Image (cartoon, helix red, strand yellow):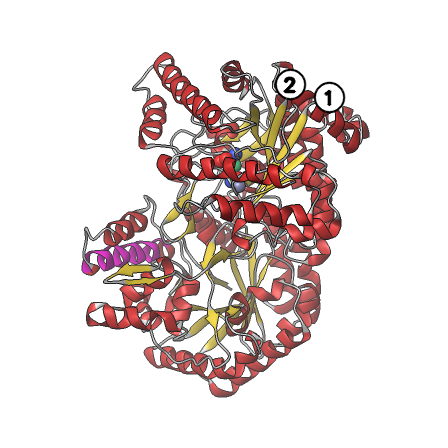
Amino acid sequence: MLKNNLGYPRVGSHRQLKKACEQYWAGKITTGDLNKVARSLKEEHWQLQLQAGIDLIPCNDFSYYDHVLDMSLTLGAIPQRYSKVLADVKDNREIDLYFAMARGYQKDGLDITAMEMTKWFDTNYHYIVPEFTANQQFSIFSEKVFAEYEHARSVCGDKAKPVLIGPVTYLLLGKEKEPGFHRIDLIKKLVPVYVEIINRLKLQGATWIQLDEPCLALDMSKKEKEALEYAYQAISNRVSGIKIMVATYFGALADNAPLALNLPVNALHIDLARAPEQSDEVLALIPDRLSLSLGVVDGRNIWKNDYEQSIQLVSKAAQVIGSNRIMIAPSCSLLHVPFDLDLETEIDYGVKNWMAFAKQKLAEVSDIYEIVNGDAAALAANKQANASRRESKLVHDKAIKQLQESVNESWYNRFSQFPVRQKLQHARFKLPLFPTTTIGSFPQTDDIRQLRAKFKKGEITRANYDASIEEATVQVIKWQEEAGIDVLVHGEFERNDMVEYFGEQLKGFLFTKNGWVQSYGSRCVKPPVIYGDVSRPADMTVRWSSFAQAQTALPMKGMLTGPVTILQWSFVRDDQPRSVTANQIALAIRQEVSALEQAGIGIIQIDEPAIREGLPLRKANHPHYLNWAVRAFRLSASGVEDQTQIHTHMCYSEFNGIIKHIAAMDADVITIETSRSQMELLEAFADFEYPNEIGPGVYDIHSPRVPSVTEMAGLLAKAAILLPARNIWVNPDCGLKTRKWPETKAALENMVAAAKQARELI
Ligand code: GLN
Ligand code: ZN
C-alpha cells in the first residue's frame, strides 16, 4: 500500500512566489533571483512530503503562473502572435515568452494580447486557455518537466513522480481559434509528443508518471471517449518500463467508469471525497492488473478528515483487490486549499481542531495508512475532534434551526406579481425612461485602501475612520447628482471585499491570517470559512445606506451580497448540504433587506455574480442546484413591500440555457455584463421574452478606455430592439472599484448623455 499525492500548493506559505513574480514583472529582480525562489519553494514542499512519508511525490505540479500554460509550452502550442515576442526577448528567454502569453506583451512597439483565462472545472482557480488552429502542430518546446524531474529526483530519489495534464483533458481545456475542426481531432498529432515526453522521463529514471484526466468527471461525448481510449492505447503500445497513473477528480466517474477502468494503464486515481458512493461500482468493475489510488482526503475543503469513514473505504478496497494494489491519497491536487494551519494562531482552538490545510492533509494520508496497517494511535484524537464538532454550540444554534423550520412557502414569494409591482414602483420613483445607475462600488483609491488598513490595525480611531468614509461618500453622492445619474449608490468605500464585508459581521464565519489560495497567476484569495449556523447579530449596512440616503433626495440603492455568492466564495461546512447553509445566509440577508426597507431605503440590490459559476460539472445535476440557488435568492429578497424595488446583479455570465432560472429569481431589475459581447448576451433574454426590468451593461469596466456617447447610445438602441424600452436600465457592466477617477467620470458622463439621446429617440 502506497501513500500518494497529486499536487501541492506552489505559491508558498507566505506567498513568496507571488511576491517574486511581481518583482520580476516590475523589473526589480532578475531571472536568476526568480528561479532561486522557485527552487527553494519546490525543495521545501518536497521535503515536507518526504517527511510526511509520502511514497509518490508529485513534481512538475509547480508553476510560475499556471500549469495548463506550462503544458502548452511543453507541447509547443504557442499561438502565432507570440512569434514576435520570441524574437524580441533577449536570448530567446522562455520565461519572458511564457509571461507574455499569460499577461500580454507591451514593449518595443509590440502590443500583443494575453491568452484567455477561464475557471478550472468548478474551482476558483483560473487557467490559461490553450489556443488551437486547424493545422496545429505539437512538438516538445519547453524542457521544464525534464528539468523539474531531475531536480525532484535529486531531493526525493525514486519517489519523484512527474505530473502532466493528460492529452484528452488538455485538448478539451482549449479552444479552436479557426473554424473547420474540432480540437479533439488533434489527438493523433498530440499523442506522439506525450510518448516522447514519457520515454524521456523514463530514461531520466522516472518509475511512475501521473496523467491528469479530470475530464472523466464530466459528461463526455462518444468522440471524446474514443479519443481517450485511443490515446492511452497508443501510449501503452509505445511506452514500457514506466508506470502510468491516470488521475480523475472533482466528481464521480459515473457513466465513464467502464471507460476509465479499462484504460491500459497501471493505476487509476478516483475522488472518494466528492463521490464516496462510486467505490462499490469501481471495485466491482476493476480489472486484475489495475491499482487504485483512493482520494479519501478532501483536497477541496479545509475540514479534518473523518478517519473512520476513510478507513472503511480503504479497508473495503483492500479486501476486494488486495492492499498491494491500493494507494491512499488526497482527492485532488492540494492546490485548492491553503498551505499550513499551524500558521493560524488566532483561530479559536475549538474550531481549529476541526480543520486541516495542505500540510495537515499530508499527515492525514499518513495517519490513515498507519491505522489501516494496525497502528491506531491517531484514531482516537480524530474521532474526538469530529465528535466535538458534531455536538458543538459553536456550530449548532437552536434558534436558527427553529427559524429555518418556521419558513413556509410564502417567504419565497413577493406579495404581488411583477406587473403589479412595476406599476407601484414606477409611481413611487418616477424615473425617466432608460434610468441610469451604477453597480455599487466607485474607485477605491490608495487613500481609501490605506484608511481601511489603518483602521483594521487599530492605528486610527473609529470616529476618524467613519469621518473619512463619510467624506468620501458625500463626495461621490454629490458627483453622481451633478452627473445626472438617476439612482445613486454610496460607493462601497467601507468595504474591502463583497463577501468578506458580510462574513465579518455574520455569525458562523471565521477568517484566516494566511489562508491564501491561488486564484490566477500571482493573485491569491483568502476565502472565509463558514463553520457554523449562520445568523445576523446586528444591522450590517444600514448605517452607511441611511447616511447616504440622508445626503440626497434621489433614490439611494442599498447594496448587499447574495446568499449564493457568499457561499460560492467561501469554504463551506461539509456537515450539512450546501443548500441548507445557503438558506441560513439567505435568512440573514432577508433580515438585512427588511432593516434597510424600515430605514427608508426603497431600492435594494442583492448581488449574485457567482450563481452561474456554482453550476455542477454534470448536466444531470444542474436542475437541483439551480432550484435551491434560485430559492435561496428568493428567500433573501421576498420579504419586502411591492413598492420596494429589488435589484440583482450578475457578471461574467453566459445565460444561455439558464435564463428561465434567472427569470425565476424574480428580481424587479437585473443588471448584467453585456458590453464586451455587443449586447449579444441580451439575446437570450429577448428570446425568452424576459418579463422584468434589465440593465445590460453599456461599458466594459475592465479597461480604462472611455466609450463615446455614440457607442453607448448605439448599444442602447440595440437593446431597445430586443426588449421593451420601458424595461431597460442604463449602467456599466460591473462595479467601478478597480478603475481610476478620471476615466470613471468621463465614462459615466458619456453614459448619462447616451441615455438622454436614447430617451429622445423613443
Ligand atoms: N456591488 C459590487 C460592486 O459594485 C458588485 C461586484 C461584482 O459584481 N463582482 O463592486
Ligand atoms: Zn459584477
Disc 1: which residue: 641
Looking at the image, can residue 408 be seen? Answer: no
Disc 2 marks a residue whose amino acid type is Glu
Q: Which mark is residue 232?
A: none
Q: 198 or 294, which lies in front? A: 198
Vertical relation: 285 (above or below) 349: below
- Residue plotted at (73% across, 21% down): 641
Q: 184 or 85, which lies in front? A: 85
Q: Is residue 662 left or right of residue 698?
A: right
Q: Residues within 10 Å of mark 1 (few under 14, many from 20)?
A: some
Query: Magenta residues?
Result: 32-48
Q: Quadrant of the rendered structure where residue 507 is? A: top right
Q: Furthest residue to the bottom?
A: 237
Disc 2: which residue: 597
x, y (%) of residue 536? 59, 22
Marks 2/1: CA distance?
9 Å
Whether 228 is among the magenta residues is: no
Whether 34 is among the magenta residues is: yes
Q: Quadrant of the rendered structure where residue 399 is? A: top right
Q: 545 or 509, which lies in front? A: 545
Q: Where does the C terminus fall, quadrant-wise?
A: top right
